[in-house]
Image: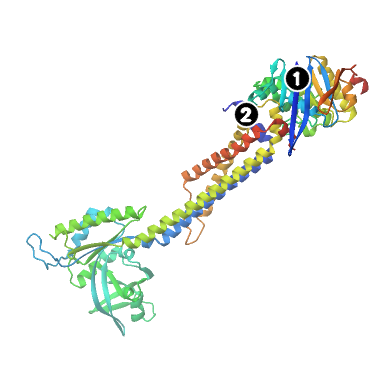
Amino acid sequence: MFSLERWTEVFDAIRKNKLRTFLTGFSVAIGILILVLLLGVGEGMKNGIEEQFEQDAKNRVSIWTGVTSVEYKGLNPGRRIQMKNKDYELLLRNFGEDFEYKSPMNRNWTSVFSHENETGSYRIEGVYPDYQFLENSGIIQGRFLNIEDQDKFTKHVVIGKKVRSELFEGKNPLGKYIKSNGINYKVVGVYQDPGGDREESRIFMALSTMQKVFGRGNDISNISFTLPKESNYDVALEKSNNLINEIESLLKGKYTVAPLDKSAIRVNNSLENAKRFYDLTVNINLFFWGVGIASLLAGIIGVSNIMLIIVKERTKEIGIRKALGAKPKSIIWMILHESIFITSISGFIGLLLGLLLLESVGSLIQSEFITNPEVNLDVAISTVIVLVIAGAIAGFFPARRGAKIKPIVALRDE
Amino acid sequence: MIEIKDLHKSYKVGKNSLHVLKGINFSVKEGELVSIMGSSGSGKSTLLNILGMLDEADEGSYHLDGVQIKNLSEKIAANYRNKFLGFIFQSFNLINYKNALDNVALPLYYQNVGRKERTDMAMSYLEKVGLANWAKHLPTELSGGQKQRVAIARALAGQPKVILADELTGALDTTTSYEIMDLIQQINDEGKTILVVTHEEDIAEMTKRIVNLKDGIIIDDRKVKQVKAMANV
């Protein structure tokens, strides 16, 4: 099948038909190049869009406590369950590896704050630095609280946009002080929240500061954390449910709460929102698979056309060879051998060029909707192989037809 | 060498059937140099194509060197063409991207002769037709006469039993035609059986036997006194 003689004959034909070889190789290489670029840009758009909507993908889990509603192990209903810092540490020890961002929280519903002559009533939330990522809020000025604020009980606060407009009337609040109950707090940052005025009239400070100032001891009213993105919604749902069950039974065991008591300890997640994101991801994937398959088809059709033309062009040569005693099989192999050889070489050249281009230009693209355009190498290589095989199959039929033409007819071809 | 009996061939032209060969009986012995003559449409090229296994007869029998040629598969036909026949065409039919030497070597490639031996043999045939110095030239760099010489060398290279030539001087001027015919006569003198299809009287006179075809039947088959081509150059 792979005799040296035929290789020599094929190389001879390739060397002596530079234009034909070049045109064939060029179109295959260009085809693969475009395919690789398309796949790369598709992947980039997928990354970009996913990044845009990633916020929604976060599965935020919140745990809060209330009053027991049923009798359990001899304990009367109506008992208040209060979580402590230790509960947060307990969760961290047990499930910390599953969390992405996490923070306990203690809040004071209304506190009066003033700056110079302006006064307002706001909600205070004492949180950890991670809390910034648990909320949809974005810092628009200064910074969020950091670990130093937590460790050193600093009187630093981050205020909402509404607070800024009410207390500072458009002036720069950074470094200024706001006062509550005779204590001055330094403003280190301003945030905004898509939730609007209600969400933006909050003031964040470090949990440690908050617990001290308000005499809350080690109490916390709420623990929240996010779970990282999963490959699809079902996996996310399953992981989330398992985790929630484990956390619930751990806490309920610790506080001696009936397993079915819904009001004493509640754990909830926001996975319903995330479903939209996962659906979007699935749709984007489907779309780019569609684009990929369509471009692959276009490539296959292109290669097939080239093969048809090559066989047509060589009809007379086929006639001569047959008159000299070439068997049909040797004609078919001659054509396939050459075409597979050219399409493989140029296919990989196109692949290489495409990858180089993506690598060099890809990082320069500054667009919100295209991030890290890249191609999975396995996908790219199998694409080339599919094209080469398709080219061979596409070449086989015209080659066989060419081999079947009576030499007398082929010789008449001009 | 060639034995044909009651050969019929018709072509379909639209709805009508065109009866081209209407019962040809004809034989050629080894070493003969025969010309088949006739005006265009007489069926001479069809006859040659059937003899060359490039086309098939509808009826009748054809024996080549004692082998019956009938209902051949493509593979066997290719094999027989390769072993038994050498072709010379009016339009040369050289492969234009191969040089003279490689063109001559091509029948040997299909006889599975090794590359080195193939090249040596091809070179000796090129020498025989006087083109040793042109071995590395492409057909496009050769004159018509030279191309036909390469084609003759190629026809000889496969060491066939019979050489079939279809209007081999049709594309050449008179002087070159006679030079080519001189070469054909030399090859025939060495014992090769050659069939030449032509419509030119003077070319036919240079063979040893003229078969006249008209409207699909042989109207005349006679031995002639061969005119040596060299005498006319």
Q: Position of residue A411 (x, y in %)?
A: 73, 33
Going by the numbered disc 1, the residue's amino acid type is Ile
Q: Residue at x 26, y 70 (%)?
A: A125
Name the side, left or right, on which A199 lies relative to B169. left
Quadrant housing the C terminus of chain A = top right
Q: Which of the two marks, 1 or 2, is nearer to us in this view? A: 1
Q: Find residue A22 and report its image quarter.
A: top right
Chain ID at mark 2: A
Name the side, left or right, on which A65 lies relative to B161. left
Which residue is at the far left? A74
Q: Position of residue A396 (x, y in %)?
A: 59, 36
Q: Position of residue A334 (x, y in %)?
A: 63, 32
Chain ID at mark 1: B
Q: Position of residue A285 (x, y in %)?
A: 44, 54
Report the front residue among A58 and A85. A58
Residue A189 vertical placement versus A231 (above, below) = below
Name the side, left or right, on which B15 lies relative to A193. right
Quadrant housing the N terminus of chain A = top right
Check disc 2 and report the residue beneath it.
A330
Check disc 1 and report the residue beneath it.
B4
Crowd around label 1: few <14 · some 14–19 · many ≥20 (10 Å): some
Q: Residue at x 60, y 26 (%)?
A: A4
Is label 1 on the same chain as label 2?
no
Q: Find residue A118 and report its image quarter.
A: bottom left
